Image (cartoon, rainbow, N blue to C red):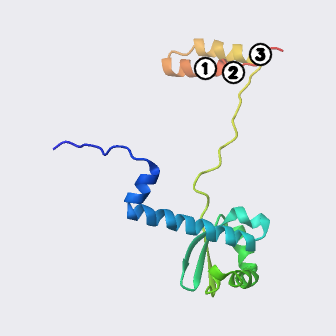
């Protein structure tokens, strides 16, 4: 039995033919619309730290990036709940639940530039020549290449 991949389809056609994909896209659009409404009620500083997770019956669950922001939002919970209840989409909400989840993508570490003086590079290169282990010698030679170019 051989596997035959389906032919590529245009996005519009794919959405028309696949009902589960249509439901998924509609759910994503609904969450995005609710997130925008939530952002209108949040203070500007907190918007990037608070995301709508679910809205089930009378409970709104929000994902917060760290404990600091969760605490700040818990102090503002009563005001936030009152503001949200004024919006028709959130009118049935009686409780807000906060869950802390750090961002999924770690922040990139700043690029490290190793620049030695020319003299330091020569010393490292000379040390590399005296090493018998080829792997360590290559590593030392790579390190020696990080010398500053005289300007």
Give the CA separation, mark 2 to mark 1: 7 Å
The residue at the point 57 percent across, 68 percent down is 31
Q: Give the class, few, some or many, for how many residues have Cα within 10 Å of label 1's Cα (few <14, many ≥20).
A: some
Tell me, yes or no, whether the two marked residues, 3 and 2, touch with CB atoms within 8 Å.
no
Q: Which residue is mark 1?
A: 142
Label 2, on which residue? 146
Q: Is residue 93 above or below residue 50?
A: below
CB-based contact (under 8 Å), mark 2 and mark 1: yes
Give coordinates of residue 23: x percent, y percent.
45, 67
**Is residue 35 left or right of 17 when viewed as pictured?**
right
Residue 63 appears anywhere in the view: no
**Is there any visible trace of residue 143 in the rendered image?**
yes
Q: Dot 3 surroundings within 10 Å: few (below 14), some, or many (20 or more)?
A: few
* Residue closer to the observer: 51 or 145: 51
Q: Tell me the residue at 74%/66% (across/down).
A: 46
Outermost residue, left direction?
1
Question: Label 3 to label 2, Cα distance in Å?
Answer: 9 Å
Please give the name of the residue rendered at 46% of the width and 53% of the height, measured from the top-left corner: 12
Q: Which secondary structure, mark 2?
A: loop
In what quadrant of the picture does the C terminus appear? top right
Which of these two is toward me, 41 or 12? 12
Q: Quadrant of residue 113?
A: top right
Q: Pointer 3: what residue?
A: 149
How much space separates mark 3 and mark 1, taking CA atoms?
Answer: 15 Å
Considering every residue shown, the one lying at the far right of the view is 151
Please determine whether, in this image, residue 65 is positioned above or below residue 79: above
**SS class of the residue under badge 1?**
helix
Picture quadrant where residue 74 is located? bottom right
Using the image, determine if residue 93 lies above or below residue 66.
Answer: below
């Amino acid at each position: 039995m051989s596997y035959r991949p389906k032919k590529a389809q245009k996005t519009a056609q794919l959405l028309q033919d696949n009902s589960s994909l249509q439901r998924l896209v509609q759910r994503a659009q609904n969450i995005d619309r609710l997130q925008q409404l939530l952002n209108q009620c949040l203070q500007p500083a907190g918007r990037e730290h608070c995301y709508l997770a679910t809205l089930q019956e009378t409970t709104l669950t929000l994902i917060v990036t760290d404990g600091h922001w969760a605490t700040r939002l818990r102090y503002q919970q009563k005001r936030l709940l009152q503001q949200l209840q004024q919006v028709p989409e959130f009118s049935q909400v009686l409780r807000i639940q906060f869950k802390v989840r750090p961002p999924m993508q770690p922040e990139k570490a700043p690029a490290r530039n190793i620049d030695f003086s020319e003299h330091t590079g020569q010393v490292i290169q000379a040390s590399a020549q005296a090493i018998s282990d080829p792997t360590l010698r290559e590593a030392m030679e790579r390190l020696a290449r990080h010398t500053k170019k005289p300007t």
